[in-house]
Amino acid sequence: MQATGTSRQIYGSDRAGYNYLFARGSRIANYQINGIPVADALADTGNANTAAYERVEVVRGVAGLPDGTGEPSATVNLVRKHPTRKPLFEVRAEAGNRKHFGLGADVSGSLNAEGTLRGRLVSTFGRGDSWRQLERSRDAELYGILEYDIAPQTRVHAGMDYQQAKETADAPLSYAVYDSQGYATAFGPKDNPATNWSNSRNRALNLFAGIEHRFNQDWKLKAEYDYTRSRFRQPYGVAGVLSIDHSTAATDLIPGYWHADPRTHSASMSLTGKYRLFGREHDLIAGINGYKYASNKYGERSIIPNAIPNAYEFSRTGAYPQPSSFAQTIPQYDTRRQIGGYLATRFRAADNLSLILGGRYSRYRAGSYNSRTQGMTYVSANRFTPYTGIVFDLTGNLSLYGSYSSLFVPQLQKDEHGSYLKPVTGNNLEADIKGEWLEGRLNASAAVYRARKNNLATAAGRDQSGNTYYRAANQAKTHGWEIEVGGRITPEWQIQAGYSQSKPRDQDGSRLNPDSVPERSFKLFTAYHLAPEAPSGRTIGAGVRRQGETHTDPAALHIPNPAAKARAADNSRQKPTPSPTSWRVTASIRAPNCR
């Protein structure tokens, strides 16, 4: 992800493992599709492919009231492609290292003479090897949408998005960081802890519909509904997750089978408009939205002690026979539900001064089947979260912005007993200066922020099966700053650069989530359009990313020997391992006069 201050942490493989995004010292918990908050778009809709989206918007900091949380990390909004009135026909082909190959097509246009009925169809296919040894993947997507103007001021749309993906020799977990004596293990990015028969299959069907009505030039009513059903199947075997013998490199094997069938209903209705008061024009937004999520999950698993004689040799072959049965069954049922209403206004007190006032009332409930107690455990909360902001225009190019918001962030992490943690509460302060030049083509900004949180999930260790469990940190504080510049320096040359620094600390001053959240990051991306006015103009680009170190806290690991635990503490801060390089070449053809 190119957005300044964002980072990605993967445990295991891309699809079979755990894939998290972070910003400003916290995990990104706010996901939207076309502005509708969803339970977890990236995990539950199978959205590994982004061909169906016109763009991916990342808003750092508090995004506002519609998401219902006030989470100061970031909000990721996936904006779908909509039909075009003029004909569009484009085909794409790409190839890259590690045997990567992909094809895609995008067709759109009017379906009747009046242009009131429009459609768009997008399809993609891709396959290739991973930077991990033995691992391979393939995926496909079919996306379609119809849009109809039932009246001059009323528009409806409906569509579907179907995706399927398969990975082989993929792992749901990663190798242990330390061996049995507390020494750092010597695994590299290419080493694979999965057996060669491990695989994962994911299918996702997304159905959606919406209506938009403009009462006049100032007022608009919008309603949308979204339904997603996914199916995930995964037979797996992973080695070296729990412990690796220091002398022989022998390790346990965890074979198992896992499947899940998540279903998500999301809906949203909003009213936006302008009103006049005290001789000035002001903005108003009101709405209600929510989602309901449920998932049946079932797993089987065993632990075979010292099944692998040498973990390092195993990482190159993945050779071990697939068991026919497992010792442990893991039934699981999860539900999450959130609904809330919000109201906000932007009051223009003067030509260069605006005040933003608003609030949201949210109701949240989550439940999970606990295999230890053989019953459901629930967590629920109701919360009003106010939001205030101020915008002051210094000049025609520069503006100052400040905001205060309360926090209410439901969490998916569970404690060592298998129960959901309570939602995060607290508050956030932020101040920004923003500017734009070259008629809006070049933008720059700088921001400072401070967040205080209670019930914040932080990794506390791994259970006997290798799964991470969490504890709730109270009086946690995060403060930091970031600066970025982006846009078109010339019509041909585009650049985006940013630096961020964030320091999350618990009430004792200890660093929070040091294994997944870097405190510093720098990103630079640039692109040069060789023929910017041509429909199929050639573009070359490059980018570089650099982030601070992350490390695992030895206190959270099961290292019983005090001397070994002390040694692990000495080895905990390792130099960043260079990421494997990747490259792709893409060619696209757009039909003439279809731009």
Image: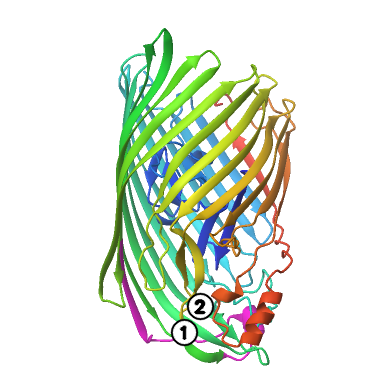
Q: Classify mark 2: helix, strand or loop.
A: loop
Q: Residue at x 46, y 36 (%)?
A: 81
Quadrant assignment, res 68? top left
User: Where 261 sits versus 21, above or below?
Assistant: below
Q: Is residue 265 left or right of residue 530?
A: left
Residue position for label 1: 322
Q: 209 or 292: nearer the eye?
A: 292
Magenta span of residues = 308-334
Mark 1 to mark 2 CA distance (whole Å) = 7 Å
**Residue 499 spot, x, y in % from top left:** 69, 44
Is residue 566 shown in magenta? Answer: no
Residue 197 badge:
2
Q: Is residue 586 left or right of residue 594?
A: right
Is residue 320 shown in magenta? Answer: yes
The amino acid type, in three-letter code, at marker 1 is: Gln
Q: Is residue 249 left or right of residue 292?
A: right
Q: Residue at x 34, y 14 (%)?
A: 216
**Residue 560 spot, x, y in % from top left:** 56, 86
Mark 1 or mark 2: whose residue is earlier in sequence: 2
- Farthest top residue in view: 279
**Residue 439 spot, x, y in % from top left:** 66, 19
Q: Residue at x 43, y 31 (%)?
A: 83
Q: Evaluate whether residue 294 shows in this view.
A: no
Q: Is residue 2 left or right of residue 285?
A: right
Disc 2 residue crowd, few under 14, some 14–19, many 20+, Cα 10 Å: some
Q: 216 or 127: nearer the eye?
A: 216
Q: Residue at x 72, y 25 (%)?
A: 491
Marks 1,2: beta carbons within 8 A: yes
Disc 1 residue crowd, few under 14, some 14–19, many 20+, Cα 10 Å: some
